[in-house]
Image (cartoon, helix red, strand yellow):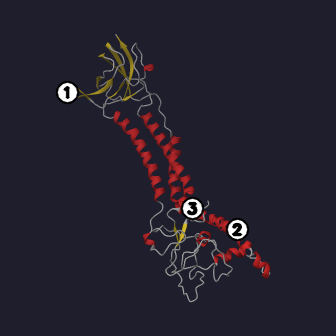
Amino acid sequence: MYYAPERPPLRFVTPPEWPQPSPAWVARNQGWQPPVGWLPPVDHPGVSLRPASPEWQFWVQDPIAWPAFRAPYAKPAHRAMLWGAIFFVVGIVVTLMGYLGELGGTFLILWGAIIFGGFRLVRGIVAYRSVDATARAGLGAAVRQTRAELDQSAYAAYLDQTARDRAATGRPAMSLDEFGIARDAEPWTFEAPGYSSWSTQAPAGPVPVDSPWASGSTPAAAPAWSQASVPLASAAPTQRPSRRVMWIAMGFAVVLVAGIVIPIAIAHGGSASASSGDASGSSVDGNYYVADHDWKIDNADSCGDAGDRCFVLKFTPEKTCSDLDLTWGFSSTSTGDEKAHRSTKLSVVAGHTQIVRIPDDAGIDKLDYVGLDAANCG
């Protein structure tokens, strides 16, 4: 991944009484951890600096640039959580709908979707938790790329601007590697420095090299090129966006399952209520057409004032019939053979809902599924 030199993902935290590095130094040396006792180069005679404490946190995450840098590393985890939640929810919903008889004669257990979706969801959650570590590991390559591009650009300007002096004195030009080391030895300043300059000063002590950087959180706003001394305890966590994505994905899965399963469960609630089988017009015999939406199970289980238990069905006819004979079939499973039949006679008016009550007698008290087998208008 790459970052813009003018907005690097990490800020440099200067210890108390230290001068400021240049923006170019910060961009070229992202994450470099100075060794214990290291002091920056200065060109102010008489200035005495004290080394930073061994536990000093030199780098913190920029509140704007770091999320932008880590975003590409978070995308695979976000996709895994999203698709995992979709497959998992679809598998659960289809399986439950089949179990409750909402799919008629079809009963599927989508083990593939459930297992695959659950695996992807868990894998995405685990991956999101390591996004920051993955981004930190990828920062090393980004620093090398940025460092090379900045040095190449500045080196060309250096050769052009020192050509006349080198021709007059016969002094050879620095190599690109020497030029990069000299830039690292550029004196720091107690004022906000300009972005581009170079130095021919030899380094006085260790210069930045590739090394792991210590992670930290982002304190209050400060100049992009460095961060004034701020207690690390005031840092604000930077993993909240990914954490929100995880909870959104999980919440989406829960809400979708609840929104589909709960209404189905309510429709099939009650000890004497039954789950409907296939009630489409094509499956009903007789001379009276009944569509699948014309009747449904009602969430009630009593017959009249006596309080006897019964199946309660709601029937809304599409045609008027003064003598309608409905034959209901009962079974123990949604796809099993019917074990009992009951008939009801109604006088119906098109569009007017009728309540059909079938007493829960000894012949059907242990049967859980009901379907409309025939409808005849006399």
Q: Of all residues shown, which one is farthest toward the left? A: 305
Give percent across and percent down for residue 76: 56, 52
Q: As shown in the figure, which amino acid type bears the numbered disc 3?
A: Ala
> Which residue is found at the position 76% from the left and 77% from the top?
164
Q: Are marks 1 and 2 in contact (CB under 8 Å)?
A: no
Specify which label sits upstream in the sequence, 1 or 2. 2
Near-viewer residue (6 or 117): 6
Left or right of residue 59, residue 357 in this image? left
| Residue at the spot of label 1 | 306
- Judged by depth in the image, the label closer to the viewer, 1 or 2, is 2
Residue bearing mark 3? 135
Residue position for label 2: 152
**Image marks 2 and 3: residues in contact by CB distance under 8 Å:** no
Within 10 Å of disc 3 (Cα), the crowding (few <14, some 14-19, many 20+) is some
Q: Is residue 109 left or right of residue 35?
A: left
Q: Earlier in the sequence, mark 1 or mark 3?
A: 3
- Tell me which corner region of the image, top left, top right, bottom left or bottom right, holds residue 274: top left
Please, what is the three-letter code of the amino acid marked with disc 2?
Gln
Dot 2 falls on a residue whose secondary structure is: helix
**Residue nearest the observer in this picture, 190 or 121:** 190
As drawn, the residue found furthest toward the top would be: 378
Tell which of 33 and 150 is nearer to you: 150
For residue 253, say whether it is visible. Answer: yes
